[in-house]
Image (tube, helix red, strand yellow):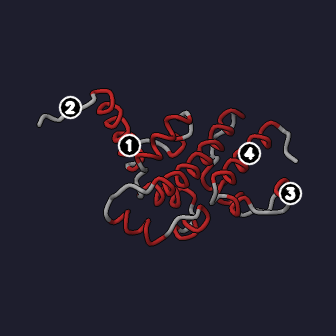
């Protein structure tokens, strides 16, 4: 029986494969994941993101991988196994990893828009900021909300409000 392949899908998957290769080899910065629209992010999550991406994020944030796993609510043992096997994460874990990567990208974009990105490290800033109690969150640390989609949305909105000056 002849297998029919969809040329559009094949091209799409090849582009995504190149994106992951370029990110994992550090030819592209982590912030490259931020500009993707919601539909593209849904596709990425459904396909799965490489487990190694979590390792890169923890390195960029200068925090232990175990701490990042705990913050975003993914099982450390699963991540370690999938990193060893060079596999993709599950849909749920992919969403969480992509969420933290997008947060770093959001901060990077905010700083670039301000016109003063020289010397600023968005990943390290995010790591520090996530651990600081925020008055706008009733004194909670943003890290406490990073393990749910709604929590990541709240944190992203809070950062946007900080940029616009509507922070409270």
Of residues 163 and 36, the one drawn nearer to the viewer in this rendering: 36
In-image side of 118 versus 89 (left or right): right
Q: Quadrant of residue 162?
A: top right
**Disc 4/disc 2 C-alpha distance (Å):** 46 Å
Mark 4 highlights which residue?
Answer: 159
SS for dot 3: helix
Q: Residue at x 13, y 34 (%)?
A: 2
Q: Earlier in the sequence, mark 4 or mark 2?
A: 2
SS for dot 4: helix
Q: Earlier in the sequence, mark 4 or mark 1?
A: 1
Mark 3 highlights which residue?
Answer: 135
Q: Residue at x 52, y 34 (%)?
A: 39
Disc 3: CA contacts within 10 A as few (<14), some (14-19) or many (>=20): few
Disc 2: CA contacts within 10 A as few (<14), some (14-19) or many (>=20): few
Residue at the far front: name it. Answer: 1
Q: Earlier in the sequence, mark 2 or mark 3?
A: 2
Proximity of marks 2 and 1: CB atoms separated by less than 8 Å: no
- Residue 22 has which mark? 1
Q: Nearer the viewer, mark 2 or mark 3?
A: 2
Q: Residue at x 33, y 32 (%)?
A: 9
Residue at the far left: name it. Answer: 1
Mark 2 highlights which residue?
Answer: 4
Q: Residue at x 60, y 52 (%)?
A: 123
**Disc 1/disc 3 C-alpha distance (Å):** 38 Å
**Disc 2/disc 1 C-alpha distance (Å):** 29 Å
Q: Position of residue 96 (x, y in %)?
A: 55, 55
Which quadrant of the figure contains the N terminus? Answer: top left
């Amino acid at each position: 029986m002849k297998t029919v392949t969809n040329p559009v899908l094949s091209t799409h998957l090849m582009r995504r494969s190149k994106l992951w290769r370029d990110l994992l080899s550090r030819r592209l910065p982590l912030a490259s994941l931020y500009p993707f629209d919601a539909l593209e992010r849904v596709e990425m999550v459904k396909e799965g993101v490489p487990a190694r991406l979590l390792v890169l994020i923890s390195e960029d944030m200068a925090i232990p991988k175990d701490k990042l796993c705990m913050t975003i609510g993914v099982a450390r043992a699963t991540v370690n196994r999938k990193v060893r096997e060079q596999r993709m994460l599950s849909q749920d874990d992919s969403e969480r990893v992509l969420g933290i990567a997008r947060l770093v990208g959001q901060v990077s974009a905010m700083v670039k828009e301000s016109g003063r990105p020289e010397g600023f490290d968005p990943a390290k800033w995010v790591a520090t900021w996530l651990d600081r109690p925020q008055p706008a969150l009733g004194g909670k640390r943003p890290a406490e909300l990073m393990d749910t989609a709604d929590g990541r949305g709240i944190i992203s909105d809070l950062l946007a409000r900080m940029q616009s000056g509507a922070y409270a």
